[in-house]
């Protein structure tokens, strides 16, 4: 790829041969830059683009002259939303206003971006695929959106987002969990995130205690945010048609976040929801789990109570190390179950408990010197949300 610029700024950090591992940072004002494909022509016409009506004559002609076709990659979740009514509806329901800076993750060829540009003050679009970046640039250039659009060609999970008021995006479904986690736990302040998600994922986000879909994802997100269902979107509204239907949800951060150690909370909910239909009593009696928590509590917050677990046999002789550990595990299990009994939660399933009940239980464990995360280790949002 070559890029020519008349004035203004173009940053191109690093590029490798394989475009999938390519890491390019392009940041430009659409007014200033013309990006060309290998042939020297503006790159790519996308046969899947929805709205030639919205493309002015100049751009359309230029696109029609392209022989290149964008190959869409499943692994990057490249299903383009092509129903104009749905696209318009997402923009209007997002509540974007003329003074807003909108963050869009995965703009693709710009079906949503061009609509956002019409109503927002600024759009910052973060796209991992440099071919999409070129396609988007070609589409918007010369349309009067000068200086309104910043495109960052980078993996959204690695990007450090600048200040924004709203997120509006049809995201790649493969990064839904870590991306939602990044938005709600990443320290950003924004009015709302209107996201198009796989329907099953959205249903889990929207679930409440007692619902069959209620799981660790919902528990964690509900700690800091409220989630509202906006609308369902048929798989037929995408090109190529995916296997799954979609839903739009709106996520709003709570004004006040509960006073809880987040790394502890994530690790605690991971333990409780490991088998979400088991009772807490059954989960905290598993030998492997008890031993793991015992070890963690030893390195992390071992208080005097717990230290006293170390035992002698009845004759007063010291036992060998494996016996001592066995005995410690047994005593530690009694301690764990005792706390559950005190909280009245031994027979309860985690998926039926409110966040307040879970927070109280975590606080009881921590007060007893029982920890779920090694406090010396740094917080890792991605690891905490992996597999959700
Ligand atoms: C579902 S498509 C949406 C495209 C466009 N917004 C639309 O609605 O037609 C998802 C887009 O996200 C991009 N993408 C995939 N993984 C990404 C990542 N980790 N960071 C940023 N963009 C990503 C894909 O290349 C693709 O363009």
Image: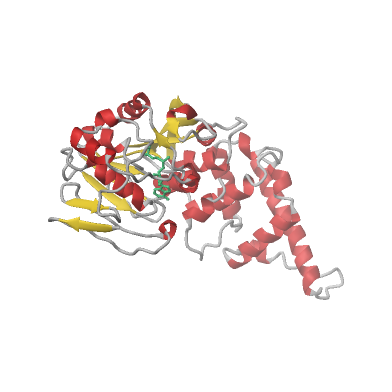
Q: Position of residue 352 (x, y in %)?
A: 62, 34
Residue sitting at x 74%, y 61% = 329
**Please, is residue 337 above or below residue 91 in the view?**
below
**Quadrant where the image shows the N terminus:** bottom left
Q: Position of residue 380 (x, y in %)?
A: 48, 57
**Quadrant where the image shows the C terminus:** top right
Closer to us: 335 or 183? 183
Q: Can residue 349 be seen in this snapshot?
A: yes
Ligand 1: quadrant of the figure? top left
Q: In the visual, does 273 lie left or right of 138?
A: right
Q: Position of residue 80 (x, y in %)?
A: 40, 37
Q: In the visual, does 212 lie left or right of 1?
A: right
Q: Can residue 265 be seen in this snapshot?
A: no
Quarter where residue 248 is shown: top left
Closer to us: 96 or 36? 36
Quarter where residue 359 is shown: top right
Closer to us: 56 or 305? 56
Q: Position of residue 258 (x, y in %)?
A: 44, 44
Residue sitting at x 59%, y 49% = 270
Residue sitting at x 81%, y 73% = 319
């Amino acid at each position: 790829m070559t890029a020519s610029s008349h004035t203004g700024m173009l940053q191109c950090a690093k590029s490798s041969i394989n475009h999938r591992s390519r890491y390019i940072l392009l940041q430009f004002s659409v007014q200033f830059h013309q990006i060309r494909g290998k042939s020297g022509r503006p790159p790519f016409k996308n046969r899947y683009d929805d709205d030639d009506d919205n493309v002015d004559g100049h751009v359309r002609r230029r696109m029609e002259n392209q022989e290149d076709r964008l190959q869409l990659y499943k692994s990057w979740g490249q299903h383009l939303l092509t129903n104009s009514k749905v696209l318009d509806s997402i923009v209007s329901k997002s509540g974007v206003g003329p003074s807003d800076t909108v963050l869009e993750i995965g703009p693709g060829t710009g079906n949503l971006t061009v609509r956002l540009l019409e109503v927002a003050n600024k759009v910052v679009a973060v796209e991992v695929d440099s071919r999409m970046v070129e396609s988007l640039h070609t589409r918007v250039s010369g349309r009067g959106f000068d200086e309104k659009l910043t495109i960052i060609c980078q993996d959204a999970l690695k990007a450090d987002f600048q200040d924004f008021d709203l997120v509006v995006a049809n995201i790649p479904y493969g990064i839904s969990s870590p991306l939602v986690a990044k938005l709600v736990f990443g320290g950003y302040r924004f009015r709302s995130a209107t996201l198009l998600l796989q329907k099953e994922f959205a249903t889990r986000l929207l679930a409440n205690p007692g619902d069959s879909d209620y799981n660790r994802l919902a528990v964690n997100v509900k700690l800091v945010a409220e989630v509202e269902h906006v609308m369902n979107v048929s798989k037929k509204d995408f090109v190529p048609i995916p296997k799954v239907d979609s839903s739009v949800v709106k996520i709003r951060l709570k004004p006040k976040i509960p006073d809880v150690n987040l790394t502890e909370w994530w690790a605690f909910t991971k333990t409780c929801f490991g088998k979400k239909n088991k009772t807490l009593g059954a989960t905290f009696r598993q030998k492997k789990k008890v031993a793991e928590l015992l070890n963690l509590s030893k390195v992390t917050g071992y208080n005097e109570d717990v230290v006293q677990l170390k035992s002698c046999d009845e004759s007063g002789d010291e036992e060998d190390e494996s016996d001592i550990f066995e005995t410690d595990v047994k005593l530690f299990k009694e301690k764990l179950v005792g706390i559950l009994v005190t909280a009245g939660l031994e027979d309860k399933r985690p998926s039926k408990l409110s966040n307040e009940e879970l927070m109280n239980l975590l606080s009881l464990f921590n007060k007893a010197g029982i920890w779920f995360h090694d406090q010396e280790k740094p917080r890792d949002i991605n690891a905490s949300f992996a597999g959700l």
